[in-house]
Amino acid sequence: MRVDRSLTKKRSYIYFIRTLLPFVFLVLFLILVSGSNREIKGEEKEASDKISYLVERGPIMISEDRPEKVLEIIKGFPYKRRLDGNIQVLEGFSYLKKWILYKDPKSKEQWYGIRTNLIYTMTKDVTLILVTFLNDGEPWLRLHAAELLGFIGDEKALKELEKVGKEDENHRVRRYANWAYKQISGRKRLGQ
């Protein structure tokens, strides 16, 4: 009889452990998952803060001949964040600036690849950053900003394009700004 009781105790103990163990693992799993979700949300917030910083300061850094710094920050972003239109504009204009500054053929290839992608996938949410580049000191950046604005077709850029089309010191930039203005407005600017 004693053997039966100890055997019954062992069986009930094993049954208890088998029943409880999955719940313990489930609780541990949920704790780990919630912790990693907090880490992911923290990383997303950090990436979001960096994107805001870069969208605000990126054109200035490119204008100050620091395109490598912009590219370094962008390369730290997760792939999904790099698909943001403003980030693609900054990446493209950083490569364009590197090509202008250093005559780097790889930067030229990168610029043209990103430019082509921007032409086909661009949305109007990048208008503001492109308008910022219309005021850059580098004529090639102004020219390509006007070109891309023409492809986007956002009427919010008309006023600035008209100003650049009339007042820019570079005749090529003026020509591209007038072309972009015409593309957006559907008519030639008076006096042309």
Image (cartoon, rainbow, N blue to C red):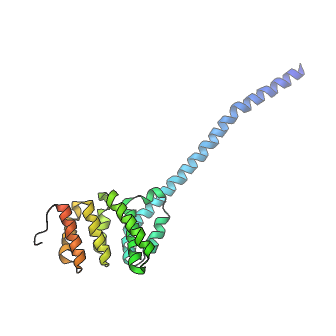
Q: Quadrant of the C terminus?
A: bottom left
Give me the residue at 29% from left, 69% from top: 145
Q: Tell me if 35 is positioned left or right of 68 in this view.
A: right
Q: Quadrant of residue 128?
A: bottom left
Residue 35 in picture, x, y percent from top left: 57, 49
Confirm whether residue 90 shows in the render: no
Q: Quadrant of residue 179?
A: bottom left
Q: Is residue 103 above or below residue 8?
A: below
Number of disc labels? 0
Query: Who is closer to the viewer here, 117 or 85?
Result: 117
Q: Is residue 172 left or right of residue 55?
A: left
* Residue located at (52% from left, 53% from top): 40
Residue 88 on image: x %, y % = 39, 63
Q: Quadrant of residue 144?
A: bottom left
The picture places residue 74, in percent across and down from the top left corner, at: 46, 65
Q: Position of residue 155 (x, y in %)?
A: 21, 60
Of 105 and 38, nearer the camera is 105
**Direction from residue 42 to residue 126 in the image, left or right:** left
Most distant residue in the left direction: 191
Please state, as top left, top right, bottom left or bottom right, where the N terminus lies in the image. Answer: top right
Q: Single out the residue that lies furthest toward the top.
A: 1
Residue at image coords 39%, 69%: 111
Task: Report the front residue among 81 and 174.
Answer: 174
Outermost residue toward the right in this view: 2
Depth check: 150 or 42 in front? Answer: 150
Left or right of 188 on screen, residue 19:
right
Residue drawn where x is 45% and y is 72% of the image: 106
Vertically, is 66 above or below 117?
below
Does residue 82 show up? yes
